[in-house]
Image (spheres, grey):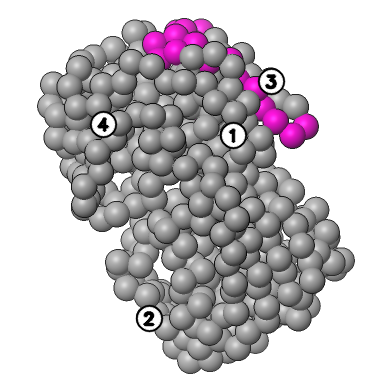
Amino acid sequence: MGELTLPGDKSISHRAIIFASIANGKSIIRNLLISGDTNATIEAFRSMGIEIEINNKEVVIYGKGLKGLSKPKESIDCANSGTTARLLIGLLTGQGFDSTVVGSQQLNKRPMDRVSNPLKEIGCNVESSSERLPVFIKPSRINKFVINTNVASAQVKSSLMLASMYSEQPVVVVENKATRDHTEKIMSYLDIDLVRMGDTVSVPPVHNIPNFSETVPADISSAAFLVALGLLTDSSINLKNVLINESRMGFVKALVQMGAEINIDITSTHFGEQVGDLKISKSSLIGLELGEDNIPSIIDELPIFALVASQAEGETSVKGVGELRVKESDRLEAISQLFTELGMSIEIYEDGFKIIGPQEIKSGIVKTYGDHRIAMTAIIAAIVANKEIKPDNISCIEDSYPSFFNDLQSIGVDSL
């Protein structure tokens, strides 16, 4: 059985960097993901005067308090990271200086109005000329204290929550659909008195954030690729210290419904999150139907889920995934192209797809559109099929999972 501990969860890593930077004093973060996306967050805070030391197994951040950030000399470059951009836009509304958030050509295609519009609605001074980056932020004061996210997005909710910390009164953020709750968990871990009721979270005015020493759990979204590998090959795999968060378990739950042999052993808690070990064994799978209510907890894993579905018996249908069209790529189109290039069949709708399996995976060159999750899906397809399948871009994998190839080799994959 292959066994390994994966890099830290990307969503939690971003948030750990943010909160450590606005905490009081020195925080130590172990197993923080160091990738293209999280480096964008690190460099953003360095540009605002925060000292950050990166060592082998831990990152040390010297926080300067809620209002201790300094005006950057230049625009804040978020590179390819949508999480960095959207969360910082909210945080920066509470600072005492003007700022501009920019990004790469790829990030510039992604919508920012889903963040800027609700922020403006509560009184924040946030502007952009194209509803995309660059976004211009000026100091402002919140004057409306209930706001609906409108879009089912943890990034939007988190951006509003970060802005709300600087309000003079509690702000109630309302979701139309539940999304991942890492921001709520880390804020509660840091003794911020959130009130969570149903689909709302009330954020109080925050005056102080304590420094901390903590470990980031392994990334469940990165684990998804190795889970798929374990299910579709003869390699049993044991993944250690993985994030077990209800709002992120849609992929695992769907696979279990399909007949997957996945055992979960809860072992500890970090940043207020449950952590456990996953044991995965080769399984015979059958198709299933995923409806709109299932999507927020599986949205990032849908490319690799589509590959797994292609090897399951019968029909798998997925509905309500229009959000895939505004990810790092138009992921619905990218998934469709991947299937076509590998000689497989998939029926794509405006906000979903249907797959009938099992299907033969053929050799091919996969167009990734610079999307790390499409690239990794292509690599797993090559291993499962034992065929020559080459993504046109593997450097994008650095955005979320820099040790991907090393981890595959550590569990016995030698045909890369």
Magenta span:
56-81
Mark 1: which amino acid?
A: Glu
Q: Name the residue under label 3.
A: 53
Marks 4 and 1 sit apart, C-alpha to C-alpha, by 23 Å
Residue 211 part of the magenta-drawn span: no
215 shown above or below 384:
above
* Residue 289: image tag: 2
Say which of marks 2 and 3 sits in front: 3
Q: Residues within 10 Å of mark 4 (few under 14, many from 20)?
A: many
Q: Residue at x 46, y 55 (%)?
A: 245
Residue, disc 4: 203
Dot 1 or dot 3: first in sequence order is: 3
Label 1 – label 3 distance at C-alpha: 15 Å
Q: Quadrant of residue 280?
A: bottom right
Looking at the image, tell me whether mark 4 or mark 3 is earlier in sequence order: 3
Mark 2 element type = strand
Q: Which residue is drawn at 39% across and 11% down?
A: 67
Residue 297 is situated, as x and y percent measured from the top left of the image, at: 41, 60
Does residue 280 appear in the picture of this structure?
yes
Tell which circle, 2 or 4, labels the residue nearer the N-terminal end: 4
